[in-house]
């Protein structure tokens, strides 16, 4: 339904992780210390990363399993944990859709938002849907709940579409905080430092060279300074 709301101008590439060969992380540290290309596993992870990198935006849809994402999804996040050091998907807009038969929607949304932000992604928003109340064939189907969530999906799709067309939107305080926190990795890893230097990020307050309002600029400078002081201590 969400893809229909986006309209025909958006081309969607589906990746269903449950049907992809992704092996568990071995904890060998090669992706952190040398390169993700040195991972001993030869499976589909890097092709998925490349597909996301080539996209204009990301839609994450996940069911809730025991207050977490499904195991295969978690394995993918584990295998791409180097992206928290080298945020490849810089500033791509993303939305999060979670489904659950009960609780856990907020916990999974918060976890996925943190993950996406660590990847350098701009989280536009999200929605949690209780499946038993939303889908017609489920026993607790609620027409008012269905209509309410459908309206929220429509509003989210338009917000996402707007972001796809306007990639230069002003970053939030959370975006500025996370970017400068991610900078901390450059003090403990030469691989990460080279990645940031090559992209010209080391002396910036945000991924893009964007003119920030006074308060946001001051906030980002303070966070950058604090990270620099901590970085000098632990490097």
Image: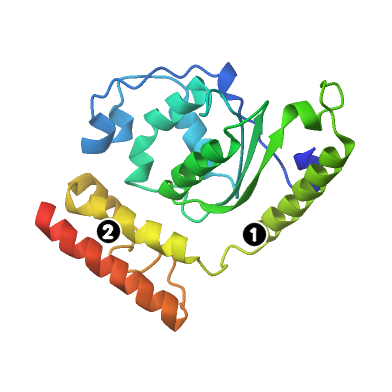
Residue 213, above or below 80: below
Q: Which residue is disc 1 drawn over?
A: 163
Q: Nearer the viewer, residue 186 or 35?
A: 186
At horizontal 32% and vertical 56% (from top left) the residue drawn is 181
Q: In the image, what residue occupies the spot 38% across and 61% down? A: 177
The answer, for residue 235, to whether it is visible in the render is no
Relative side of 56 to 33, left or right:
right
Q: Secondary structure at mark 2?
A: helix
User: Would residue 155 appear left or right of 172 to someone viewing this image?
Assistant: right
- Residue 155 appears at what percent x and percent y? 76, 54
Depicted 107 relative to depicted 117: above or below: above
Q: Quadrant of residue 62?
A: top right
Which corner quadrant of the image does residue 214 belong to?
bottom left
- Residue 81's place in the image compared with 19, above or below, is below
Quadrant in which the N terminus is drawn: top right
Task: Give the residue at mark 2.
Answer: 197
């Amino acid at each position: 339904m969400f893809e229909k709301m986006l309209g025909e101008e958006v081309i969607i590439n589906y990746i269903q992780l449950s049907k992809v060969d992704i092996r568990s992380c071995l904890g060998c540290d090669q992706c952190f210390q040398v390169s993700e290309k040195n991972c001993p596993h030869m499976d589909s992870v890097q092709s998925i990363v490349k597909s996301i990198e080539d996209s204009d935006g990301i839609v994450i849809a996940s069911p809730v399993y025991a207050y977490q994402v499904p195991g295969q999804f978690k394995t993918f996040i584990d295998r791409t944990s180097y992206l928290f050091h080298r945020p490849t998907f810089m500033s791509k807009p993303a939305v999060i859709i979670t489904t659950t038969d009960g609780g856990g929607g907020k916990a999974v949304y918060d976890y996925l938002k943190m993950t996406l932000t660590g990847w350098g992604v701009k989280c536009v928003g999200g929605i949690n849907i209780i499946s038993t109340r939303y889908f017609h064939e489920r026993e607790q189907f609620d027409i008012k709940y269905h209509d309410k969530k459908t309206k929220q999906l429509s509003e989210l799709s338009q917000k996402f579409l707007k972001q796809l067309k306007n990639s230069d939107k002003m970053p939030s305080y959370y975006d500025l905080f996370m970017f400068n926190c991610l900078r901390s990795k450059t003090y403990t890893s030469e691989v990460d430092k080279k990645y940031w230097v090559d992209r010209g990020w080391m002396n910036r307050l945000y991924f893009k060279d964007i003119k920030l309002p006074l308060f946001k600029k001051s906030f980002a400078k303070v966070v950058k300074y604090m990270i620099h002081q901590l970085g000098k201590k632990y490097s």
